[in-house]
Image: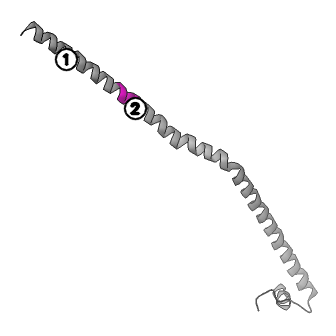
Amino acid sequence: MDEKKLEEMYQMVRENNSMLKSARRSAFVGGIIKAVWWVVILVVLPYLTWLYLEPYLNTIMAQYQTLQAQSGAVSGQAAELQKQLDQLGGGASSLQELLARFGIGAE
């Protein structure tokens, strides 16, 4: 082969090698950026959302627990009232009858 042609081929091979290295580097950096992006989407955003919503959720849970406690207290008071009505005997023999007299309960 001619010396000039060999030199041209050598230059083309070097240029091709340079382009391939650049493409591989770009693919590698792109993969790292994509991995960081998915970490942000799957870890950081839910964490920030939790930090934002946590005070509201704690308030809701506290109110729910208070409501449950009050409901239990009302149930206990209703049972106590029923027991006292049963002890009294006469008049209204059950809480349902008493409530029906006031038009609150189902008849």
Q: Which mark is residue 12?
A: 1
Q: Nearer the viewer, residue 36 or 81?
A: 36
Q: Nearer the viewer, residue 93 or 99?
A: 99
Amino acid identity at mark 1: Met
> Left of 45 or right of it: where is 25?
left
Q: Nearer the viewer, residue 38 or 6?
A: 6
Residue stretch rendered in magenta on the structure:
25-31
Q: CA distance from mark 2 to mark 1?
A: 27 Å
Residue 91 coordinates in the image, percent (x, y): 91, 92
Pointer 2 residue? 30
Residue 40 coordinates in the image, percent (x, y): 52, 39
> Left of 40 or right of it: where is 13?
left
Q: Is residue 7 above or below residue 37?
A: above
Q: In the rendered structure, which disc, 2 or 1, sits on the residue that comes first in sequence?
A: 1
Amino acid identity at mark 2: Gly
> Left of 86 or right of it: where is 58?
left
Q: Residues within 10 Å of mark 2 (few under 14, many from 20)?
A: few
